Image: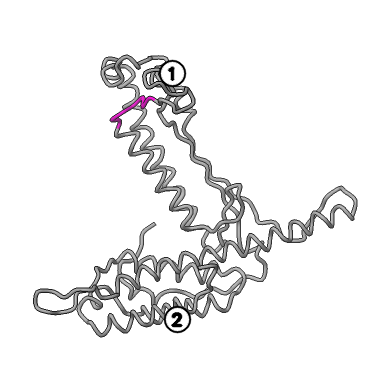
Amino acid sequence: MEQASNIQQLAAVPTINNAPSLSSSSVLSQLKISTWTARKLDKSATKKVAIDNNASAKAGNYNKNLLAGCTELDDLKKFVGNARNTHYAMTLPWSDMGLRLIPTSQYFDYQNEMTSLEGEFWRLYQLFEDAYQWRVGNAIQQAQELGGLFNHDDYPSVEVLRNKFGWTLSVQPLPESGDFRLDIPNEQQEVIKQQYDSFYRGAIDSAMDDIWVRLRKNLETISRQLAPKDELDAKGNQKYNKLYDSVFDTSLELIRMMRDFNLTGDTQMTAIADQLESALYSVNTDALKNSESLRTTKAAEVKDIIDNLPSLGF
């Protein structure tokens, strides 16, 4: 997801009106990515290590790295981690089963981003598969890396390997709280309804809290970057911490999120978004680096915003 590098773009942040129904303005998404670890428990080696060290067989395990030095697999694993982080950043938590909440107003951008990431996932997989076929075909190299631990049977066929990798993105509507059509007695149906209502309220609160947590972490980072160091330079001038555009870019995304993801119409969240936009309007890192007074002013404004955030146990 491409981010702006200049805080002046905050002026373009739109204000999105909240929809009357959470279920009509949001959907649930779930991303499942599977990969092959290329690691294999060697029971014989584990037993030998335990015997050689006079240790219990339960003291540890010896896992072989079947593709040590395979950069194609390393690149794919790193990409998967970044893809999951993008998915988390564009959504809010909803349930322990992996479902994430996303407003319908943001779904188009989310879907485009996920489609692009899926294409890259399979491109990187194909590079890995090509490298895998060469490595397995060249058993001598693998034997050199693993020595006596090499076992050709540890390596699945390409057909089996493909089934170990997958990308599945599922989207489903958000059920309306209180909407139950169950073929059970009314008394039992009421109990289930009350349980779901409790879950529903808790899930919404958790999703909104997630925004506050992200915002607090971001503002505390900005506050640290704006703060002076406990030292002077060679000319006796105050030294300051380094500023990073990426941290301010995150603020931009959070302002958008506070507007678009404010599914409960939280007036405090709206006010904080307005306050943060006002504090960072027309400000960029170059201006802050070149003006000590501006830096001091913005540090005070950011601190004021932090002081007004919900505590959430902090």
User: Which residue position holds label 2?
Assistant: 275
Q: Residue furthest front?
A: 54
Q: Residue at x 37, y 32 (%)?
A: 126
- Disc nearest the viewer among 2 and 1: 1
Percent x, y of residue 11: 39, 78
Q: Residue at x 31, y 22 (%)?
A: 135
Res 49 → quadrant:
top left
> Which three-letter amino acid code belongs to the residue tagged 1?
Lys
Q: Hey, which residue is sitting farthest left in the picture?
A: 235
Residue at screen point 22% across, 75% down: 289
Q: For the magenta stretch, what is the residue range?
A: 64-70
In this rendering, position of residue 34 left or right of residue 5: right
Residue 216: x and y, percent? 45, 69
Point out the tag, 2 or 1, that comes first from the N-terminus. 1
Q: Which quadrant of the view contains residue 68?
A: top left
* Secondary element type, mark 1: helix
Scheme of image coloration = one colour
Can you identify the residue that label 1 sits on? Answer: 47
Instruction: Name which residue type carries label 2.
Output: Gln
Q: Is residue 181 above or below residue 293?
A: above
Tell me residue 215's x, y (percent): 45, 68
- Give above or below for 175 relative to 223: above
Overall secondary structure of the magenta section? loop
- Which of the pair 158/286 is nearer the observer? 286
**Quadrant placement of the N terminus:** bottom left
Q: Nearer the viewer, residue 257 or 307?
A: 307
Judge whether 150 appears above or below 255 on screen.
above
Q: Residue at x 59, y 62 (%)?
A: 206
